[in-house]
Amino acid sequence: MTADPAHSPAAVPAALGHNGGPPMEIAAPAREALVLWMGAHPVVTCQEEANAAGALIDRARRTLADLEADRDAAVRPLNERVKAINASFREPREILERLMAEVDGRAKAWMRAEEDRREKAAAEARAKAAEAERIAREALEREEEARADAGVGDCDAPVAEAIAETDARIAEAARLKRDAARAERESPVRMSGGIGRAMGLREKRSLRIVSLGVLLRDLQMTEEVREEYLAGAIRLLKKQIAAYRTLNGRLPDGVSESVERV
């Protein structure tokens, strides 16, 4: 591979194919050699054929290295330009994001406190409404008793007074129930976005595994999902497993190893 002025940092895609042509043409000789060999050798039957296969693989690897060199020479100037553009935008964006996060944090702190206050007020309103309904039921019971007494000839039964009290208690209970419903609706706090939609607090749910064994038993995973999960666990714990083996001279319990020559 000889030096080429087209590989200077200022060069752009014109550097493609400096090894002898466009990428497809560079790959063509090695590709054709592999295809011809595969057609003539469905299986490898002797040492000589294995050596020939090794030579073709080595040639293909060198071709891949040439292709990668061409690709890198072509995209490096573009990547450097993209990197410079991203850097010019990164600082002002990060400054705005930090300031916005600070303002948002202060606003959200007030919103959480205000929402707690409103929820407490709504709970108190519900309790008052429930108490008013209880008193109204008792007033209705007294009215029914008065009506029953009057029905059997008790002229002193305070029917009119009982009716008036019941009506007043029911009206009061209805008013307090409306107040409680309004307080419930107004519990969520919103922050006007000015030109955008109002912003409010969102629920953020976080899962935490408290017992892995119980979880795996309860999920009843299929074999496919189980194997995928275990493969992911191996990837995540690979360093810890290797450190355990180095320290203890064996794999930790619950891990097995298979060896395949490839």
Image (cartoon, rainbow, N blue to C red):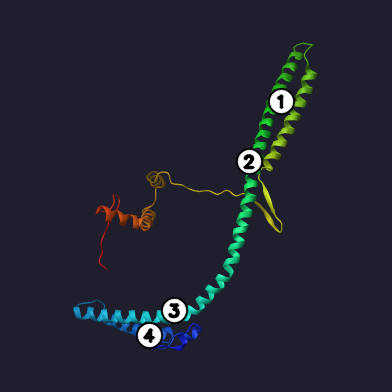
- Local SS, label 1: helix
Residue 172, horizontal then vertical, whole percent = 75, 29
> What mark, if any, has residue 61 been given in the picture?
none
Residue 195, horizontal then vertical, whole percent = 71, 59
Q: Earlier in the sequence, mark 2 or mark 1?
A: 2
Q: Earlier in the sequence, mark 3 or mark 2?
A: 3
Disc 3 versus disc 4: distance between alpha carbons? Answer: 20 Å
- Would you say the residues marked 2 and 1 are in contact, meaning their CB atoms lie under 8 Å apart? no
Q: Amino acid at mark 1?
A: Ala
Q: Name the mark nearer the viewer: 1 or 3.
A: 3
- Local SS, label 3: helix
Residue in view at x 61 percent, y 51 percent: 105
Residue 143, horizontal then vertical, whole percent = 74, 20
Q: Earlier in the sequence, mark 3 or mark 4?
A: 4
Disc 1 versus disc 3: distance between alpha carbons? Answer: 84 Å
Residue 13, horizontal then vertical, whole percent = 49, 83
Residue picked out by circle 1: 136
Q: Amino acid at mark 2?
A: Asp
Q: Name the mark nearer the viewer: 2 or 1.
A: 2
Residue picked out by circle 3: 72
> What mark, if any, has residue 116 been given in the picture?
2
In the picture, measured across the screen, residue 260 lies left or right of residue 121, that is left
Looking at the image, is 240 positioned above or below residue 115? below
- Would you say the residues marked 4 and 2 are in contact, meaning their CB atoms lie under 8 Å apart? no
- Local SS, label 2: helix
Q: Name the mark nearer the viewer: 4 or 2.
A: 2
Disc 4 versus disc 2: distance between alpha carbons? Answer: 71 Å
